[in-house]
């Protein structure tokens, strides 16, 4: 009876360690994906000319 309880406890601990590793892996992947997405959006915003005033053709040769 005690040996069965020890085996069950050992299996339970192994299962807990496995779930912990799975959650850490999933968390790492989600964090990485979120970081890449934010970085790409930031780079896109930095390289975007949409918020800058645009000159008309007749105003370009003012100087």
Image: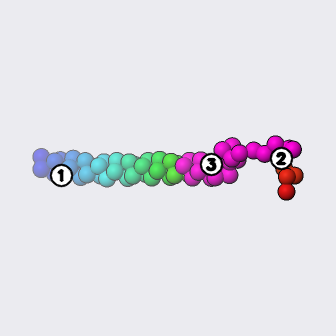
> Residue shown at 83%/47% (left/top)?
59
Q: CA distance from mark 2 to mark 1?
A: 84 Å
Q: Are marks 3 and 1 in contact (CB under 8 Å)?
A: no
Element carrying mark 3: helix
Q: Locate residue 3 relative to residue 11 in the image: left or right.
A: left
What colour-coding does the image apply? rainbow
Viewer-side label of 3, 1: 3
Disc 1 is placed on an element classified as helix
Q: Residue furthest front?
A: 62
Q: Callout 2 environment at 10 Å: few (<14), some (14 to 19), or many (20+)? A: few
The percent coordinates of residue 39 (x first, y second) are: 57, 52
Residue 49 position within the rendered picture, expressed as x and y whole percent measured from the top left: 70, 47
The magenta stretch spans which residues? Answer: 37-58
Q: Nearer the viewer, residue 42 or 15?
A: 42
Camera-side residue of 49 and 59: 59
Which of the numbered marks, if any, corresponds to residue 59? 2
Q: CA distance from mark 3 to mark 1?
A: 58 Å
The mark nearer the N terminus, 3 or 2, is 3
Q: Is residue 39 magenta?
A: yes
Q: Quadrant of the C terminus?
A: bottom right
Disc on res. 6: 1
Q: Measuring 51% from the left and 52% from the top, which residue is drawn there?
A: 35
Q: Which residue is mark 3?
A: 45
Measure the C-alpha gap from mark 3 to mark 2: 26 Å
């Amino acid at each position: 009876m005690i040996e069965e309880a020890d085996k069950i406890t050992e299996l339970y601990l192994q299962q807990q360690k496995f779930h912990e590793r799975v959650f850490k892996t999933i968390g790492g992947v989600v964090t990485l994906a979120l970081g890449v997405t934010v970085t790409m959006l930031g780079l896109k915003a930095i390289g975007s000319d949409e918020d800058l005033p645009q000159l008309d053709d007749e105003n370009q040769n003012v100087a």
